[in-house]
Amino acid sequence: MRKKRVLLFSEGFGTGHTGAAYALAEGIKLLNPDVQCRVIELGKFLNPTVAPWILSAYRKTVSSQPKLVGMMYKTQYHKSLNRLTKLALHRIFYTHASQVIDQLKPDLIICTHPIPAAVISRLKRRGLDVPLYTLITDYDAHGSWVNAEVNRYLVSTSRVKSILTGRGISPELVTVTGIPVHPKFWERSNKTQLRKELGLADIPTVLIMGGGWGLMFGKDVMNSLTARVDDIQLIFCMGSNNKRVAKMRSNPLFRHPNVKILGYSSEINKLMDASDLLITKPGGMTCTEGQAKGIPMLFYKAIPGQEEKNCQYFVELGLAEVLDSAVVDKWYTMMLREYAALEEQRKRRLAPDRHQPGHCASTVLEMLGNPVTSTESRSQRAQSRNEEAAIVT
């Protein structure tokens, strides 16, 4: 019998959409190695020359004109992609996307970005007979995610489900799965051992993530972060912004044994386990990874639109605060004076009834009709069946 195949389409606008696709693929393969998964960034795969220019323009717009990005998000919030945009995407991607699908012959297509979701929806309208799932990778649902041809929506919370059903989508077509994270985030490792492995001091530690593009914050907050560097270890993880890494390493402010400055890292899961506090932009994937690890979070510079909604969700849940100098001082004081209490709080955040990061992968396997193979995974799947109500709204 031919193995089931799952094709996941994404786009490279930020790192979260493709990160979610790879996380789901790895989760599916872990729970059932007989299911084949393939992740493709549609634009980069089909047009590797033009795609980097488009992504670069988007990055510059987000960095230099965030208010414009927010205005566009809000004015189009209740609208699907317009007919002209869908026609343009159809003309650009139709032939190649159809050829890819014909070659790979997937049993299921999952899209983690609105653009490939719109492209595949149009292919289905033209006769493609493959189930299409849309995985929404934030804690909000912009209208651009909505297409009539989608067979099922996989969403982060029941709140997002309510937004979709409020737009006329049948509740039976929306499943609350949580946003998938890589299996490396499904369990927590020993903090002391990890610090030794990573060459870190065994003292209160803050992980500061600059986002996938290495974006940063202002001088006042930076001074607050470094004010107690003799007692609190700082790990700056700046993503792909190599210029920022070089500039920070040459800055006397950061020349201290308790300051580590990293570029891109494939060990964010270990760094989160080794740290006591996470400072980050509120991207959907990073927030969910932090939640899976139970680490308290401080958010800075939310991009107007979906990141603002992500920030609002986690702050209301009590899992995060908005970053400013006073908040940094408060957390530093707690880390130095109430460390044991913070550790106990983190353990409570990891209670099984709060969040099961493998839920999305096990749900997709159930819908695909493929069993979870290992005994441990079967137990996890049984627990996941009762989880939809436990994913906090």
Image (cartoon, grey):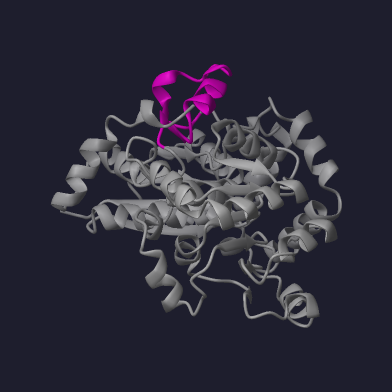
- In the image shown, does 158 or 88 lie closer to the viewer? 158
Q: Is residue 311 left or right of residue 369?
A: right
**Residue 264 in the image, given as x and y percentages of width and height:** 59, 71
> Which residue is at a point 21% across and 49% down the rendered structure image?
377
- In the image shown, does 178 or 39 lie closer to the viewer? 178
**Residue 270 in the image, given as x and y percentages of width and height:** 45, 66
Q: Quadrant of residue 261?
A: bottom right
Q: Quadrant of residue 117?
A: top right
In this picture, which residue range is highlighted in magenta?
149-177
- In the image shown, does 178 or 127 lie closer to the viewer? 178
Q: Visible in this render: residue 3?
A: yes
> Which residue is at a point 58% across and 19% down the rendered structure image?
167
**Residue 242 in the image, given as x and y percentages of width and height:** 71, 76
Vertical side of 263 occupied by 334: above or below:
above
Q: Is residue 351 left or right of residue 232?
A: left
> Which residue is at a point 48% across and 40% down the rendered structure image?
135
Residue 278 in magenta stretch: no
**Residue 84 in the image, given as x and y percentages of width and height:** 73, 36
Q: Is residue 48 left or right of residue 358?
A: right
Vertical side of 41 occupied by 388: above or below:
above
Vertical side of 199 occupied by 139: above or below:
above
- In the image shown, does 178 or 91 lie closer to the viewer? 178
